[in-house]
Each structure stands twice: as C-alpha cells, then as structure tokens.
Image (spheres, rainbow, N blue to C red):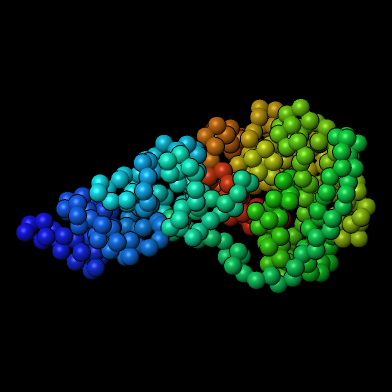
Amino acid sequence: MKSVALFLSFLAAAAQAQQAPLDLLRDMETIPFQQRAVAVDQFLDDHPLNPVAQTGSDTLVLLYRGPCRDVRLAGDHTAWNDGIAFRHIPGTDLWYLADAYPSKARLDYKIVVDGTWRLDPRNPLTCVGGFGPNSELQGRDYRAPAWLAEESTIPCRLDTFEVVSPQLGDTRTVVVAVPGGATDTPRPLLIVHDGLEYLTLGGLRHYLDVAGGGPFGSKLPICVCIPPVQRTAEYAESRQEAFGRFVVETVMPLIEVRYADIGEVGAPWGSMGASYGGRITLDLARRYPDRFDRLAPMSPAIAPEQHDGIAARDPAGLRLYLNWGRYDIPGLIPACERFDTMLTERGFPHRTEVLPQGHSWGLWRDTLAQAFHTLYIP
C-alpha cells in the first residue's frame, strides 16, 4: 500500500509540477521497479526537450533514454573529454545528468553512448563547427545576437578570385565581401583569416547583409577572405613567414588595384581571425607594423613572439578587439590573459570580452558585431 501511495504521489507531483524536475528524478528511485516505466513516460511527456531547467536555478538537466551500458557528456565545458557520467535510474532506460552553468552560457556538446559520440536526440538546437554539428546548450539568460534573426536589408556582394602565390607555390580562392549600400568615403580593408568559414559558420555574410543597411553601414570594411591550405603550418609554424609575405606582397596589392575606386588604398589594413587565425592576425601586425592598425584576434593561440611584437608597437597606432571563452582551450587562456594585461598596461585602445562559451564558431559569431564596432564604428 505504501508503494502505491508513493507512486500516486509521484504522478500527482509530476502532473502539477509541484516538485523540481531534479527532485522528481531522484524520487523515481524510491518507487517500485514495476512502476518506474510509467513514471518515466509521465516525466518525459512533461519534459520533452533538453535541457530541463530548474526554476530559479542555473542548474540544467540533460536526459537520455535508451538501452545502453554507459552515457557520458563531452563538450566545451569538459574540454571535450567524455569524463562526466550520466546517472542511471535502475529498472528503467532513463539516464540523467544535472549540473550548474552560468546563466548566459552557450556551449557545444555531444552525448557519448557506449563510446559512440552523437547529437543529443532530445535537443533540436545545434551549432555547426569545423568538424560538423554539435548540440547546443543555452543557459536561461543566453540571448543570441539580434542580427542573427534579422532579414537582409542590403546584401553584400561576393567577388571570387583565383590568386597565385609565388611565396607558397600554390593557387587559392580568395573571396571578397563588399558591403552593400553607398558610401561617400572609401571603405577600410580587412583581412579575414579562415575567411570562407567566417562567411558561413561565423555568420560574416549575414552580418554584412544586415548591418549594410544600418546606421553604420557606410563604416563597414571590405572583407578579404583568404583560406589557408596548410593551416597549422601557415598560421603558426614553418610556413608562417611565407604566408605573411603572400598576404602583404600579393593579396593586398591586388585588392588595392581592383578596389581602388571604393577602398582605402595605401592606408593600413585590419586583420581578424580565430584560434590559429588569431595568431596569424597578431603575427602580421608584428612583422608589418606599418600595414596593420586594427586587429580582432578571437580565442587566439598567442606565442611569445606575437605578444612581444605587439607590446613593442606604439599604442597610438593600433586598436584591438580581443576575446576568448571561459570554457576555451585551457592551454591558450593564460596567454590571452597576459596579453590583455599587457594591452591595458601599455595603453593600447582595446576591448576584451570573456564569455561563458567554448572554443567554437558560436562564440566567434556571437562576438562579430562587437569586433566590428570596436575596430570601425566610433
């Protein structure tokens, strides 16, 4: 009789939402085994999507249902290690994991079921990264940038060029994004590293489409999107110097000729990139201090030579936007913090943001407008 009362009490609490979801999950283990399947069905009917929020709390609950031996979580907040195990409710096929997250968090993750990494089947939100889509966890106060939901007003124009690189011994496709709308003054020029990914995964094309018709549309730069071929070598290792010469000696003169009627020909350029793209952003500015005056390194992998090279520059001739995620690659965060401290102590005009996100295109997309405003909009 007591077990029946417990079961009826559980169903009543679930139906009336008198208990927090996490308490209901814990209470499932107190009711008879033969009644738990019905309780699971009721609970999942009431909470069809992940994550399940706790009212007035930053705790979020992830659920997985299915026959298996082990369920784990891997994502930005675990450094993509699959070490966080879900709890199994005996006598059922339901697994759950509860954890607290910053209220404005936005994190990529996957669920690992018996060693197989997969999207969360109970979460329709995804964020596409360099290795495909991940499920997206959003804290209760997270809000995506407003421009993501806005329709294009004055679409940007995409021009494509095949550019031969004598410095690197290859040919690559460079895409130039020209903001729409008229302007009375020449537009600044911006190198975008991993540019093809920025246009798509980073939302750059849509941002230019939306912002082009806004009050600061005439301030937007012409974005020269250069793809790497041997990314690590060109951005961070043995081919870094040759890649820099390709940018400065081949790409920049070509663009200044082709866009002489609308671009700031002869003026310093900007440079933007993420991760190793952030490193080459800084490296170009230290090798060619007269050619670059605005930088947006995002989650940059900063080596000592880039730190010291920027520190040696005149603060009056450089403006920066810097960011990284609270759940970024652990090894790069200390260098970013030291770099930010140096910028402040040396008096460089800059804006730094640390968001509760990871090393992902979601972070760099979410901060795109802040970068452009810092570099180009007074």
Q: Is residue 90 left or right of residue 64?
A: left
Toward the viewer: 290 or 25?
Answer: 25
Q: Is residue 358 left or right of residue 280?
A: left
Residue that extends furthest to the right in the rendered view of this protein: 257
Q: Residue at x 67, y 40 (%)?
A: 278
Toward the viewer: 169 or 356?
Answer: 169
Q: Is residue 346 left or right of residue 281?
A: left
Toward the viewer: 98 or 242?
Answer: 98
Residue that extends furthest to the left in the rendered view of this protein: 1
| Quadrant in the picture for the N terminus | bottom left
Q: Residue at x 50, y 39 (%)?
A: 80
**249 is higher (above) or lower (below) than 132:** above
Residue 195 point in image, percent of width and height? 74, 49
Residue 341, can we see it?
Answer: no
Q: Residue at x 65, y 43 (%)?
A: 274
Residue 20 point in image, percent of width and height? 26, 58
